[in-house]
Image: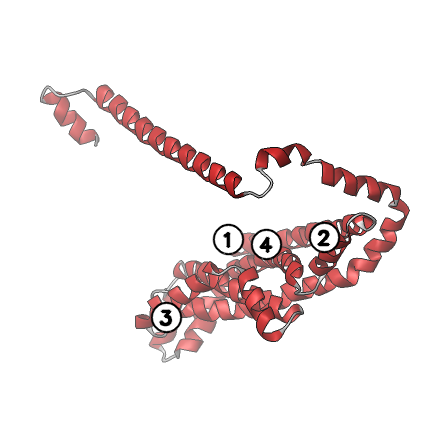
Amino acid sequence: MTEATAVAARAGGPTIREAYFAEVRRKRLYGGIILAIFIVLMVAGFRLADDRNAGGFWDGILNIFQFPSEVVSEAAEKAALLPGLVIHFIPSMVETVNIAAVSTLIGGLFGIVLALLSTRGLARWPRLIGLFRRMMDGMRAIPEIVIALVLIFIIGGGPVPAMIAIAIHTAGALGKLFSEAAENADMKPVEGLQSVGAGWLQRMWLGVLPQVAPNWISYALLRFEINIRASAILGFVGSGGIGYDLRIAFQWGQGRYDEVVAIFIVLFITIVVVDQISSVYRDRLVKGAMR
């Protein structure tokens, strides 16, 4: 671009300064057009959603603080009962964490297999890379709640449908992240192992995994945090755990709002503790891998 403007200047065309401001005006024009399209789409989508909303958005927005105030006021009146309720809901929270942990473990293992089979330069069957990548796309595309609803219809309610649904989505998400990390691995150890007759599994185990393990574990810990929230949400559709207790408390309505607050306290404390612990380990893993 600099050479072109210099040649144009020598030929009597626009100077570098004029060409620069012309390029700036062009970028601003494109940015303005994109912003205008975005605003139009947002307004059109909001109006469509408001028209299809049963109660009307503008009629209900004025009451947005009414329900939270009722919950907080009732919980404040029964504040002495909150510690006991928090302890009461800990087993349900443990069940939710177990669902998240098992689904993260199973999904992570399948994600490792899919990642190694879909990474260019490492795949066991290079011609099937596209197939394995589309499998991961499909796993990520279907929300966990849809998979859980189908499984509940087939095998009934409980934690198993939630675990399977989250594991499927986790395998697709982690498989994508693992594959991107594996693509950046140094191929020299792999080539060295191949030169001495090592098989594919040996090359992956000894040449690739030591390089990508810190990043993979970091991604898995982050996914574990996400899966705790997902397993709590799936409890609303009958998959057990703390989400199911929250659904029951909401259904009872007034008189049980102290249980709602207690459940939120348990969820908040759990997510904060898990986030802090996993953040410490992720920092150690990433910094250790960079040394």
The residue wearing badge 2 is: 267
Q: Residue at x 42, y 33 (%)?
A: 39
The crowding category of the residue bearing disc 3, from other C-alpha atoms within 10 Å (few below 14, some 14 to 19, many at least 20), is: some
Q: Are marks 2 and 1 in contact (CB under 8 Å)?
A: no
N-terminal of the pair, mark 2 or mark 1, is: 2
Nearest to viewer (mark 3 / mark 4):
3
The vertical placement of 259 against 4, above or below, is below
> Dot 3 corresponds to which residue?
123
* Labels 3 and 4: the sequence-earlier one: 3
Rendering coords of residue 101 (x, y %): 64, 65
- Residue 109's place in the image compared with 269, above or below, is below
N-terminal of the pair, mark 4 or mark 1, is 4
Q: Is residue 45 above or below residue 204?
A: above
Along the polypeptide, which appears first: circle 2 or circle 3?
Answer: 3
Judge the density around disc 1: few (<14), some (14-19), many (≥20) Cα neighbours within 10 Å.
Answer: few
Q: Nearer the viewer, mark 4 or mark 2?
A: 2
